[in-house]
């Protein structure tokens, strides 16, 4: 295969306060990229694109230094911290201007970098989307492993199409990214949006290892927020469940009213305040829960109609390098 016919690959890597792990994993990414180039599977114009998500440490300085040392390293920086999903999308949209295929992967080195070769092979076999899927969750804590399983089961019950044990390690062709650009959601959940794009897809399985350095920037609160965002962004079934719950509670309440009337006609008196308090608290709790679910959807509508930008790129290493050479 001649050089001009080889596909250009951009590896998109979101980074937030990764000054400890970036010096370790950057060399691993470069080794894999060079391996793929030497194997003739991608062109020499392929690049590793770091996306700085408004880091408060020296992450951006490390990225700019890497870009000066090797042309295969490039970077873009968001104007402020906007979240992991926004950073992945920013990198994909930027890379789609230059690359035929992209692979998104986290910076921490937990995902098997060598699985990229299998992804590229699957692309050459005709797949536009290749999902990186974990073999198991043996490296997770008991709590995280079981909550993750529960989340995927809930998503399936709600009718949202997701890939089990897949995060954001995936290959996308240029035409998939071009179609993805037509999805204008501000509330991003890429794991659910990618399957909606369609096209031929497959999965590559790998074992996930421990984080190589630094601490995770995805605590339970962020994972919970991502899960809620995924559920409410991809499915309206929670609203239907609220309606069903309202109907059931109404039927029970109606039966209760009939019982109270009949009991009163028979001359019996309802004694005690406990039953009254329980009913009031139960009804109040149901109402508040229903209002919360409805409010979550209304809040998303409020954010969506503002049509704010999903990402803002403030700096690019290649612009900096061009300015320096002039």
Image: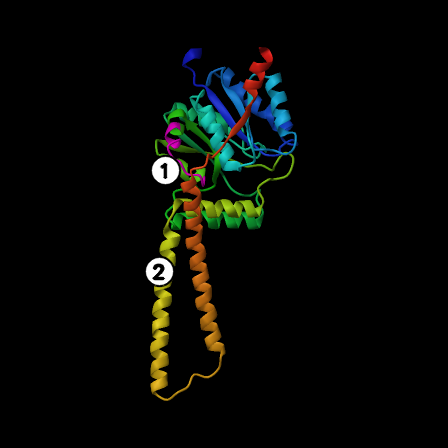
Find residue 92 and report its horizontal and vertical position in percent.
Answer: 46, 28
The kind of secondary structure element at disc 1 is helix
Report which quarter residue 162 is drawn in.
top left
Report which quarter residue 292 is drawn in.
bottom left
* Left or right of 181 on screen, residue 216: right
Find residue 141 and report its horizontal and vertical position in percent.
Answer: 58, 47
Q: Residue at x 38, y 58 (%)?
A: 242
- 151 or 235, which lies in front? 235
Q: For the view shown, which residue lies furthest in the front direction?
A: 306
Q: Residues within 10 Å of mark 2 (few under 14, many from 20)?
A: few
Report which quarter residue 247 is drawn in.
bottom left
- Point out which mark residue 196 bears: 1
Q: Nearer the N terminus, badge 2 or badge 1?
A: 1
Q: Main secondary structure of the magenta part?
A: loop
Whether residue 278 is visible, yes or no, is yes
The kind of secondary structure element at disc 2 is helix
* Left or right of 202 on screen, residue 80: right
Find residue 9 and report its horizontal and vertical position in percent.
Answer: 47, 22
The image quadrant where one finds the N terminus is top left
Q: Is residue 226 above or below residue 276?
A: above
Label 2, label 1: how far apart the Cα atoms are: 27 Å
Find residue 156 and report its horizontal and vertical position in percent.
Answer: 40, 48
Q: Residues within 10 Å of mark 1 (few under 14, many from 20)?
A: some
> What are the residue bounds of the magenta stretch?
178-188
The image quadrant where one finds the C terminus is top right
Q: Is residue 258 magenta?
A: no
Q: Residue at x 52, y 48 (%)?
A: 224
Mark 2, residue position: 244
- 125 or 22, which lies in front? 22
Q: Residue at x 50, y 25 (%)?
A: 11
């Amino acid at each position: 295969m001649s050089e001009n016919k080889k596909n250009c690959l951009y590896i998109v890597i979101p980074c937030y306060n990764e000054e400890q792990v970036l010096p370790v994993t950057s060399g691993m990414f470069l080794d894999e990229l060079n391996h793929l180039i030497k194997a003739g599977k991608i062109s020499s114009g392929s690049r590793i694109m770091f996306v700085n998500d408004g880091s408060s440490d020296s992450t951006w300085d490390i990225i700019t230094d890497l870009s000066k040392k090797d042309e295969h390293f490039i970077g873009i920086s968001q104007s402020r911290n906007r979240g992991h999903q926004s950073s992945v999308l920013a990198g994909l949209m930027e890379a789609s201007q230059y690359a035929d295929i992209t692979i998104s992967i986290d910076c921490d080195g937990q995902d098997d970098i060598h699985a990229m070769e299998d992804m590229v092979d699957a692309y050459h076999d005709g797949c536009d989307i290749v999902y990186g899927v974990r073999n198991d969750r043996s490296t997770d804590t008991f709590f995280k492993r079981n909550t993750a399983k529960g989340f995927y089961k809930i998503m399936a019950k709600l009718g949202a199409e997701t890939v089990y044990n897949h995060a954001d390690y995936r290959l996308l062709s240029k035409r998939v990214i071009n179609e993805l650009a037509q999805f204008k959601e501000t509330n991003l959940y890429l794991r659910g949006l990618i399957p909606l794009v369609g096209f031929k897809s497959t999965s590559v399985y790998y074992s996930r290892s421990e984080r190589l350095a630094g601490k995770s920037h995805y605590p339970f609160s962020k994972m919970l927020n991502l899960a809620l965002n995924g559920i409410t962004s991809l499915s309206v079934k929670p609203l239907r469940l609220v309606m069903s719950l309202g109907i059931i509670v109404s039927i029970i309440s109606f039966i209760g009213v009939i019982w109270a009337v009949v009991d009163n006609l028979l001359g019996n008196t309802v004694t005690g305040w406990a039953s009254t308090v329980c009913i009031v608290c139960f009804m109040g709790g149901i109402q508040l829960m229903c209002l919360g679910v409805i409010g979550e959807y209304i809040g998303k509508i409020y954010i969506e109609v503002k049509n704010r930008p999903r990402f803002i790129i403030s700096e690019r290493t290649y612009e900096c390098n061009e300015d320096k050479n002039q």
